[in-house]
Image (cartoon, rainbow, N blue to C red):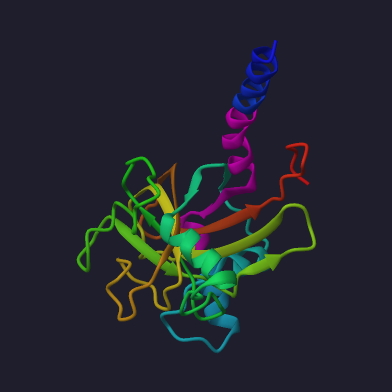
Amino acid sequence: MLSSPHLGAATDRLAVGAGVPLLEHATASTTLQVRRWDEEQTVWVRARGLARNDVPATWEPQGRHFDQAGVAPYLETEQADCNMIMQSGWASLLGGIGGTPISPLYSATNGRIGVGTSTTAAVETQTWLQGDTGSASTTSWYQLCTAAPAIVTTTIPATFTLTATFGSGNANFSWNEFGSDNGSTSGVNLNGLAGGFVILNRGVSSQGTKASGQTWTATESISFGYPSGSGTLS
C-alpha cells in the first residue's frame, strides 16, 4: 500500500519538472521591434535637420527625428520571444547581486545593439554574434544606443529596454540575428575595442535586408517576470 503514494509523488514531481521550462521561458524573454525608413525619407529628414540645426555635415537622423518630423516608417515589425540570455549575460546579471558586477555598466555612453547575417541557432555559450567575423567583418555591426537603457521595475514584468539607430551607411545586409553588449563605440565586432565587452543576449530573427541609404531602428525589450507559487507570472 505504501508504493502507490510513492508513485503518486513521483508523478507529481514529473509534472512540475515538465513545467519548469515554461517558467524559465516566461521569466526572461525579449521583444525585438524594428522600424524602417527608406532612402527618400532619410534624405528628407536629414536635409530638414541640417537646415534647422547647428549640426555637422555628417549628421544622421535618429528615430526621434523622424517622429518629430511626422515621417512614419514604411514598415514596422515586432517579434516576441526570439531571444536567449547568454551564459555571459546571466553571469553579468547575477554578478550584480552576488559577485563581480559587469564593467562597464550599461549607461548613456555604454550599451550597443548588434545585428548580423547568421541564422545559426542561439546557444547559451556563444559570446558574440555569429555573423561577427572580426575587425574586417562585413556581416555584423554593433550600434551604440541612442540613450541610457530604460529600466522599469514598477510594472509586471520588469523590463530593460535598449534602442539603437542604424544610419544610412551601416549594417546594410540581411538582418538575421541580434544581441546587445556593453560597448562604448559603434563598430563591426564585439571585442575589437579595448576592454573585452560582454554580450548579454543573442536572438535569431529574420528582419529582411537593410539597403544603403535607409535608416532602421532596433529596440530590445528584455522582460523579467516573477513566477508565483502557483506557476503563473505575477
Residue 85 lies in the magenta stretch: no
Residue 164 on image: x %, y %: 51, 65
Along the viewing direction, whichever of 34 and 111 lies nearer the viewer: 111
Quarter of the image with the N terminus is top right
Q: Residue furthest left?
A: 136
- Is most of the magenta stretch helix, strand or loop? helix
Residue 18 on image: x %, y %: 58, 28
Q: What residue is drawn where x is 55% and y is 89%?
A: 54
Q: What residue is drawn where x is 68% and y is 18%?
A: 8
Q: Tell me if residue 53 comes above or below residue 17 in the rendering.
A: below
Q: Is residue 214 visible?
A: no
Q: Give the range drawn in magenta.
A: 16-44
Q: What residue is drawn where x is 56% and y is 64%?
A: 163
Query: How many numbered dots are placed on residues in this image?
Result: 0
Residue 30 lies in the magenta stretch: yes
Answer with left or right where residue 172 lies relative to residue 149: left
Q: Can residue 225 be seen in this view?
A: yes
Along the viewing direction, whichever of 175 and 212 lies nearer the viewer: 175
Q: Tell me if residue 201 comes above or below residue 135 in the rendering.
A: above
Answer with left or right where residue 52 lies relative to residue 189: right
Q: Tell me if residue 167 comes above or below residue 104 in the rendering.
A: above
